[in-house]
Image: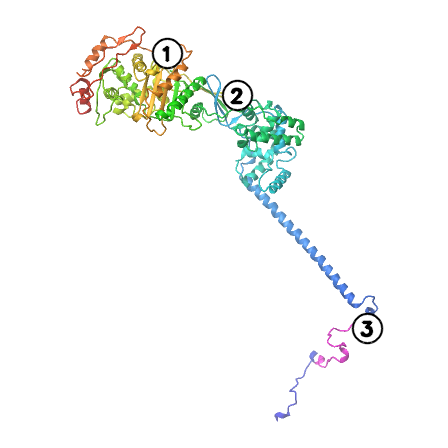
Amino acid sequence: MGSGKKKGGRKEPLFGLPAALADLRLTAADRIPGGGDDKPKKPASKRKAEASDDEPPRERKASAKSSGAKRRSKSSISAGLGRLVYWGAVLSLWGVIAVIGVVIWVGAHLPPIQSLEIPKRPPTIQIVGMDGSLLAQRGEMAGANVSLKDLPPYLPKAFIAIEDRRFYSHFGIDPVGILRALVTNVLHRGVSQGGSTLTQQLAKNLFLTQERTMQRKLQEAELAIWLERKHSKDEILELYLNRVYFGSGAYGVEAAAQRYFGKPARSVTIAEAAMLAGLVKSPSRLAPNRNPEGAEARAQVVLGAMADAKFITEAQAQASIGHPSYNVKPVGAGTVNYVADWIGEVLDDLVGQIDDSIKVETTIDPKLQAVAETAVIDELAAKSVKFNVSQGALVAMTPDGAVRAMVGGRNYSESQYNRAVTAKRQPGSSFKPFVYLTAMEQGLTPDTVRQDAPIEVKGWKPENYTHEYFGAVTLTQALAMSLNTVAIRLGLEVGPKNVVRTAHRLGISSKLEPNASIALGTSEVSVVELAGAYAPFANGGFAVAPHVVTRIRTLDGKLLYMRQPDEHNQVIEPRYVGMMNTMMRETLISGTAKKAEIPGWQAAGKTGTSQDYRDAWFIGYTANLVTGVWLGNDDNSPTKKATGGGLPVEVWTRFMRAAHEGVQVAALPNLQSNWGPSNLVQISSQVSPPTQAVPGPAPAPVSNGGYRAPPPPTRANVNARPEAAAGLDGWLMDRLFGGNR
């Protein structure tokens, strides 16, 4: 039964649209001849029209394709240009935003523009001597401001020609100059030309540092634009000429003209103007006092630029080529700079902060300063090797403390350390006058006798310089011969604390240790304070404060400080002044400073040599000057037996003899010839000389009012040791080692 199905399977009935399309079939007439081309045939009318066309069908097809390509190419170009314009606009916008951001960022690191002011010149300190002559200068050398109209016209034009040819046409920044400099630097493969304008240079000098950074260059540009808006071109040029640095510490054309040519800026020649303009490029390298050849070569370049800019004629340029008349002032390296440094240290106490340039009037005598410098340097040059002494210092002052000369070392340019003020060294026996003065004030006299014999203080056994002992000697003899054992006995007798009080009362400000060794000057002091403490012996007993400044004024004459006279504070009674002068005068007559005699003058003083010959001193004085000399080594190394009676006395004598030439002779105050019979009774009651000592004869008066010392005492047996009951020694030993006081 299954075979009853029709071949081909069952056919389902169709309805609707599918039924209508079911019988639709393509006939052969509906197909394009040639087979394989599925494109429909065009109508006959259209085919006829195409057949009647002049161009072949293939050419018409190619033309159509070319036209489409052109249309597509034009469209592509238009689209590219559009994109270029678009991105160009975007990038320009971001560039503007970036520039604005940089400007804002740079401006944020500047002080507020509205608060910017042209800063004052750095203050200059002119230091003048008692005669008004310039001794030294501190701070930068800044001449007075000069007006543009007061300068020869070729001077400012020289700067414009070499530094900023387009100065009067740009707005503070010169794009043309920057581009030119950029091209030049690229061609030379390095920085050979700068693009900064004069206004930019002024902005840098007034407000910025000299560091080479992009930030600083941007700040410089901003400030230059601000300066151009705030000031006229002539005002900017005038500011520039008065502030630019010319080397050797000179700021401004006036200071530079004075420094290099010894004349004011209004008087410089064309050649000198060209040299000044040439210095701006590299002041330290081209300064004529350091590199005259380089300065001259640079000046010729400036002259060529001036001629090229028609500021001068070619004939003027050629006539100006040559060496200007230099009058270069050498940078100060003399010992007077030690004085200048000392003044710099005390200025703040005298006038406070300095905002304006000032003139400091001092007590320094330039002639005496030169003599002191020569005395120290020449003596060291001749004998420093022999005695292994490398440095020296000298201070000379009037009896009222006015410093007339100060040498802080042999060469200021090599060492600025002031050995006269800052250094503190052991004064050795030059400290002994304070011990003897204390003894005088406790009732002793120059004729009082004390024992010169070996002594031991708690294991310490000091000796005399010669290792000799003279037994019973007067205090005058002991001081003149600088006998150490007598000074120690005397110091212990009067009390080390009293000795320290005496020294401080007379002007020593350093800390002093009140022990037995203080009598030999083991506590350190400076030259200036020791000389100042000797001044009361020369002035009749009045305390002084060593000083060098008398007045301080601004350059326009305003008085800032004037030293007031010291109060008459009597620190030594006149009779004790006379006693000390009598004893210390003997030091120069028959003692350790016999070479120090000044013909026609009464002089007194005391030598000093510290332990192991490390320091050699002499402090001597007349009624005219008190002068202290120290010689030694900075590292405190021993000398080759340099003593106070040697080199220091020679330096002192050389200086003092020159300093007293033509000065009216004056006697030391309160000199006495003898101390009367009552003193002899006192002497005999105070000490019983040992049997082995041979005391000298009593002092005798002389007709000229001075004092003649007894002959040097005869040497005693160095092995003799006084017994405990033997006069002063016994009394001293009892007090030191357990006896009743």
Residue 588 screen position, x and y as percent: 32, 15
Relative side of 613 to 38, left or right: left
Q: Tag 3, which secondary structure?
A: helix
Extreme-top residue of the structure: 703
Query: Which mark is first along the chain, 2 or 1?
Result: 2
Relative side of 262 to 607, left or right: right
- In this rendering, is residue 390 above or below 32? above
- Residue 44 is tagged as 3
What residue sits 66% from the left and 85% below the top? Answer: 11
Query: Which mark is first along the chain, 2 or 3?
Result: 3
Residue 622 screen position, x and y as percent: 36, 14
- Residue 599 is tagged as 1
Residue 454 picture quarter: top left
Q: Residues within 10 Å of mark 2 (few under 14, many from 20)?
A: few
Read off the residue under disc 2.
556
- In this rendering, is residue 349 above or below 73? above
| C-alpha separation, residue under disc 1 versus residue under disc 2 | 46 Å
Q: Tag 1, which secondary structure?
A: loop
Residue 571 picture quarter: top left
Magenta residues (range): 19-45
